[in-house]
Amino acid sequence: ECVRRTGRQLSDSRVHRLICRGGPAMAVRRRKITKEEVALHNVGADCWICIHDLVLDVRQDFLEEHPGGPDIITALAGQDATASFEDLAHSDDARAWASKFIIGYLNDADEEAKTKLLPKAALVKGTGSVRNEGINQYMALAVAAIVAVVFFTWRRRS
């Protein structure tokens, strides 16, 4: 069975087929692609996105089968979608599925981009949004303040 990281079972058979069984097979030779060329593919019928310097051609069948719906992706068509992709904390299954749509790499990407796939969730540094990282910092400050208050209150009573 396929279960998302959220623990929710995928009931839609189309989603199950795409994520668990790998989805459509695409054997594409990768090539260098400029940001300007990516920007030309900016509509649902012709949608390219960049994630971690990799260029993905997200075809109509991908858009229709995407668990979050097509609008999430088409809003980023022709752009770098790395931050949005990571903010949603995609599972390793979703990353493997999306890697099947890689057609190339940005021309300023490192040599590794010629063969790499989308990184596993555990390997991505700084996953989560900047907003969440800020909340974590405030939580740490709040905990430190509570500990200080408890300590000084306890010390006065001793």
Image: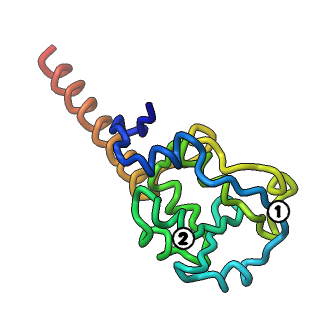
At x 17%, y 20%, the residue is 154
Q: Secondary structure at mark 2?
A: helix
Q: Position of residue 105 (x, y in %)?
A: 77, 64
Tell me if residue 127 comes above or below residue 58 in the rendering: above
In the rendered structure, the answer to whether residue 116 lies left or right of residue 1 reads right
Q: Which residue is mark 1?
A: 30
At x 52%, y 58%, the residue is 85
Residue 11, numbered circle = none
Instruction: Sort mark 1 into few (<14), some (14-19) or many (20+) by Cα contacts within 10 Å.
Output: some
Q: Position of residue 44 (x, y in %)?
A: 52, 78
Q: Amino acid at mark 2?
A: Gln
Q: Position of residue 29 (x, y in %)?
A: 84, 61
At x 37%, y 42%, the residue is 10
Q: Amino acid at mark 1?
A: Arg
The residue nearer to you, when weighing 81 against 137, is 81
The residue nearer to you, when weighing 12 against 112, is 12
Q: In the figure, residue 158 lies in which quadrant?
A: top left
Q: Secondary structure at mark 1?
A: loop
Question: Which of marks 1 and 2 precedes in the sequence?
Answer: 1
Q: Name the colouring of the figure.
A: rainbow
- Locate the N terminus by quadrant: top left
Dots 2 and 1: beta carbons under 8 Å?
no
Considering every residue shown, the one lying at the far right of the view is 111
At x 44%, y 54%, the residue is 88
The residue nearer to you, when weighing 18 against 113, is 18
Of the two numbered discs 2 and 1 in the rendering, the one whose residue sits closer to the viewer = 2
Q: Which residue is mark 2?
A: 60
The residue nearer to you, when weighing 62 against 123, is 62
